Amino acid sequence: MENLRSLLRSTAFRLAAFYLLIFGVSSACLLTVVYWRSTVFTAQQIDETIAAEIQGLQERYRLLGIPGLTQIIAERSRRQSQSLYLLVGPQGQRLAGNVDGWPTSERDSEGWSDFDFILTVGEDRERRKARGRIMSIVGGFSLLVGRDVQQRQDLVRLIESAFWWATAGILALGLVGGLLISRQTLRRIDAMADASAEIMGGDLSRRVPQDGSGDELDRLAESLNAMLDRIENLMTAVRQVSDNIAHDLRTPLNRLRARAEVALMAESDVEAYREALERTLSDADSLLGTFNALLDIARLEGAADGGPRDPVDLAEVVEDIVELYDPVAEEAGIELFKDADAGGAVVLGDRRLLAQALANLVDNAIKYTPTGGHVRVGSLELAGKAILIVQDDGPGVPEKERKRIFDRFVRLEADRGRPGSGLGLSLVRAVANMHGAEIVAEDAEPGLRISIVLPAAKTAATPKAKPARAAE
């Protein structure tokens, strides 16, 4: 009973009932028009036939009088099966015709009347319906001319029966069809609801079932599953970030605490306290930088509108970043080269963020390139794509680790002793995703080559903007 109530309350059943109502009303209107046209047409035909016969008999009467009229009525009565005639005298005596008695039904002002008559076939007598017109003739004579309308009555009853049977059939089939459709739809919706309940219960690997029909429910399930995939990835990333924060920030926080305790316990002079406070502030700045980088990544990943979409000449961005990092590279004993032609690669995007991403890549390349090495920064356009390239001849990254280096807090074992939080490349990926770009990390033989592949835009570049400082 509960399942039946659910079916009757379902949207699918209501839609089916609504369309059934529309179809039923349309069918009723159609059958009504057919009924009306059929009855009116046959009635008009009968009246026109009777009127034509009366006109012919009147012509006969004007030419031959009562004897001639009696003769033609007698002849027609013998050979007509549908036409009815009756001529009576002034005293009501029957003179000619094929109707036994004068009809007793009422007639209208023009003499039209619907009446019953007895049809005799052999020994069988049958009461049938007829329609006729009564004419008065000079001298007290009366003439009845009519037609057997029993077939018309049978047709009317047949149409009426068909109307009610069709209505009942439409209602029955529509109700059954509505229940079947509602049951099928409700079953699929229940499956979605069950999957949603399991997902809300904590099973993020559960997915909404699809039946492969490609209908609107299948498309909805496909969209929900894509959303669930995204949510699961985000939840996994959140867990990983939480774990990484707990592991990577615990050491500097413990160091801060230990340094403060040592400074408090020891009886040191002002310089020692100052040195301890300066080192504490340095560690605090490093922690704040880490949290700021996390906030920047979260902001970029959560940007709904994709940020500004202004024309940006990548060659100008390359020139600014190379100019900014040239002193840093020179101090580290590394040669920094640029390879970009102005106007060669133009994209639509946020110049500040693209500069930030490139700065992070260049800072990362300088950090891991040994003294005497080389770092190349360039831009080019190829097959409708604008590409930013940073290449170094350092130790490189193993192929199986190249995708991981863009995750938050990921640092390879060989880099654990180097400064940094492992968020610089994560910010690069967030900027690339925001611009609909692809990041490719390849072996430079030796070293590492990282390319940001963006959709190119054939338009003029905007004026230069100051590049942002690189995040660690």
Image: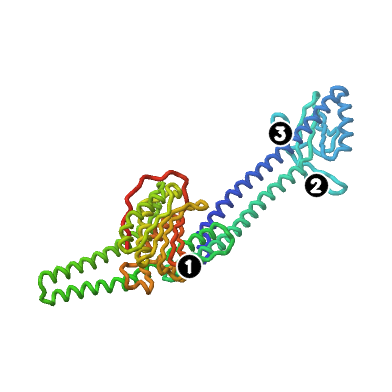
The C terminus, quarter of image: bottom left
Disc ID at residue 126: 2
Position above or below: 349 against 408 = above
Give the mark toward the camera: 2 or 1. Answer: 1
Marks 2/1 in contact by CB < 8 Å: the verdict is no
Residue visible at 57% across and 64% down?
211
* In the image: residue 361, left or right of residue 257: right
Percent coordinates x, y for residue 195 in the rendering: 48, 67
Q: Earlier in the sequence, mark 3 or mark 2?
A: 3
- Residue 25 visible to an observer of this rendering: yes
What residue is at 70 percent from the left and 37 percent from the top?
40
Q: Identity of the amino acid at label 2?
A: Glu
How many residues crowd mark 3 within 10 Å: few (<14), some (14–19), many (20+)? Answer: some
Name the residue type under label 1. Answer: Ala
Query: Residues under labels 1 and 3: Cα distance?
Result: 77 Å
Residue 318 image position (x, y, % from top left): 39, 53
Would you name the residue on which mark 1 appears? 195
